[in-house]
Amino acid sequence: MKTLIKDISSLVTIAGNNEKPRRGKELDNINEIQNGAIFFDEKILWVGSTQEAEIKLHNGEISPEQTISLKGKTVFPGFVDSHTHLVFAGDRANEFALRVRGATYQEIAERGGGIIATVKAVRKASEDELFENASKHLWSAIRHGTVAIEIKSGYGLDVENELKLLRVNKKLSGAFPIHIVPTFLGAHDFPPEYKNKPDDYVEIICKEMIPKVAELNLAKYCDCFVDKGYYTIQQAEKIFRTAQDYGLKIRMHADELADVGAGRFAGEIGAISADHLLFVSDESLEKMKNAGTIATLLPGTSYFIRMPYAPAKKIVEKEIPIALASDFNPGSCFTENMQIILSLAVTNLGLNCEQALVASTINGAHSLEISSLVGSLEVGKEATFAILDCSSYVEMFYHYGINHVKEVWVKGKKFIEN
């Protein structure tokens, strides 16, 4: 149905030069139209001011089947959450209680908690149980404005259960109309049965998991946790070279717990995105800049596990493209609400509101290589967007801790109304 939405107090289009991810001063341009209007069916047909829309209506240039007035509301492209671990079982509330008493992420992992605790729960869970739990969290993410999302495996850590997680991911793609981008993360941690022989597990990833994932077309990307106490650069290179041979592209958990040169390696291996980067070095940032690797920042994790924040302002000043994502997972960042992530980005990362919006929309879409479809409101793209119950996008940052999303539209149809 052809629809005209007009009288939009703040229409945040993020339109402009979006052929490449934005960096530096480009991050400040959100191309806001006050008293804006948008005309669409499944795709966006025209964007401009309400005054221009009235002229086009009068001249017969646009003929909407329905017209909606959104006085006092904000429309923006919706969030592209480019780093999540949404499919899992169980919870780790007990670990949270330990952390607030002073235990560190590493200490909890050494006691058998952390990723391995979720692995044990996932191995016991059926596909239906995993799907039901994931659906609940995905509905919540969409209600908070997410219109595209990356979902990793990584809580199976054996052939059977990694494939199980990815099959659930594929089932979610069939059940929800938003873009769901799958990533294989068999190298999230080492399973207990291979704790003392990690290289043997790397062999299983390369010789059994990756070939099967590729054969069944269950993932677009391959990820690896390259950090202190997890995968070495040498192990990750073997995994990534194998993944590339099978047509998978590279994403990476990098330098979250220490500077191990993972950011540098991300640039060298041609990773689409290097994520976390709490302890990234200047040398690594230069490699990433030269390679065009996106720095995906996850301030919710720093907040949740009481870690330092990534050097966001330095990364922006070096003109490296940034994306913002939730890192939604049961252990180190248990929120699917991207509005909270943006609040943390402006208060603790030092970004401004415009930079945070660009990083969580068009740059997130570039990170998932779906920027031709979503991430900005431009003619020819999908008519997918979120409506905020506020007259300016700034209010979403100012009045934090609540859900400002009134409606979410996907491909020209209202999908959710809060």
Image (cartoon, rainbow, N blue to C red):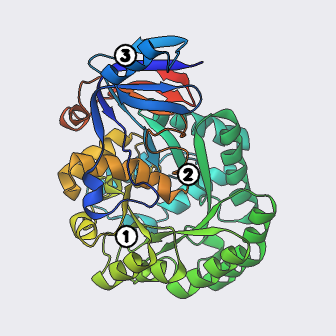
- Quarter of the image for the N terminus: give it: top right
Residue 7, image x and y in percent?
32, 18
Tag 1 residue: 256
On the image, the x and y values in percent for residue 299 come to 31, 55
Q: Amino acid at mark 2?
A: Ile
> Which residue is denoted by mark 3 in the rendering?
54
In this rendering, position of residue 82 left or right of residue 318: right
Nearer the camera: disc 1 or disc 2: 2
Which kind of residue does numbered mark 3 sit on? Glu
Could you tell which of marks 1 and 3 lies nearer the N-terminus? 3
Label 2 SS:
loop
Closer-to-camera residue (204/273): 273
Which tag, 3 or 2, sits closer to the chain's start? 3
Q: Which mark is residue 302?
A: none
Q: Is residue 311 or residue 27 the one in the foreground?
A: 27
- Indicate the secondary structure of the residue bearing disc 3: helix
Q: Position of residue 255 (x, y in %)?
A: 38, 74
- Residue pictured at 30% horizontal, 45% vertical: 30
- Residue displayed at 36% across by 44% down: 14
> In the image, is 194 to the left or to the right of 342?
right
Residue 390 appearing in the image: yes
Discs 3, 2 touching: Cβ within 8 Å: no
Residues tagged 1 and 3 counted as in contact (Cβ below 8 A): no
Q: Nearer the viewer, residue 38 or 355?
A: 38
Distance from disc 1 to disc 2, alpha carbons, whole Å, reads 26 Å
Residue at 56 percent of width and 33 percent of height: 43
Q: Visible in this render: residue 418? A: no
Question: Which of the numbered marks, if any, corresponds to residue 370?
Answer: 2
| Percent of width and height locating residue 406 | 38, 22
Distance (Cα) linking label 3 and label 2: 32 Å
Seen at 71% across and 81% down, the residue is 203
